[in-house]
Amino acid sequence: MKDKEKLQQIQAILGLANLDDFTILRWHAPAKALPGEAGYVIIKELFPDEGVICCEAAYENGRFSYISSDTEIPMDRILGWTYAPYDERADSLGRLRS
């Protein structure tokens, strides 16, 4: 199945009028894949007392950090990361480009 057909199938399942009504974010486990050096990502972070929170972060020199404070985020709290929807390092189905 081609990418456009997959997107149309998702559109139908969600009952949306057109393909511009949704974006696919595919989460990547840091243990399996890391973002490109010196870039911005969205992370899914687990806070033991608060649950899961998603926020923007930076990745540089093998570490994730908050954009607002440059504080390093412990790797064991990061459940996943993804590029922003407008970032061309992921395709329309959220897969990482080589």
Image (cartoon, rainbow, N blue to C red):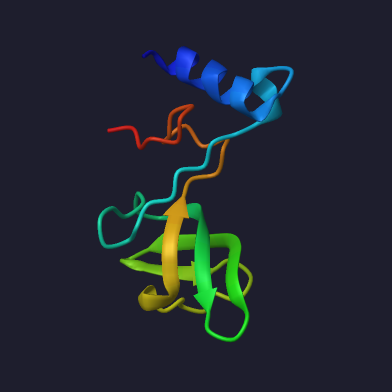
Horizontal and vertical percent position of residue 85? 56, 38
Viewer-closest of 16 and 83: 16
Viewer-closest of 13 and 32: 13
For residue 97, above or below residue 80: above
Residue 24 lies in quadrant: top right
At x 53% / y 84%, what residue is drawn? 48
Horizontal and vertical percent position of residue 45? 51, 69
Quarter of the figure with the N terminus? top left
Quarter of the figure with the C terminus? top left
Residue 49 lies in quadrant: bottom right
> Is 56 on the left-hand or right-hand side of 63?
right
At x 51% / y 74%, what residue is drawn? 46
Q: Residue furthest right?
A: 17
Horizontal and vertical percent position of residue 13? 60, 26
For residue 83, above or below residue 10: below
At x 55% / y 25%, what residue is drawn? 10
Viewer-closest of 49 and 85: 49
At x 43% / y 69%, what residue is drawn? 78
> Is 85 on the left-hand or right-hand side of 34?
right
Horizontal and vertical percent position of residue 68? 64, 70
For residue 51, above or below residue 39: below
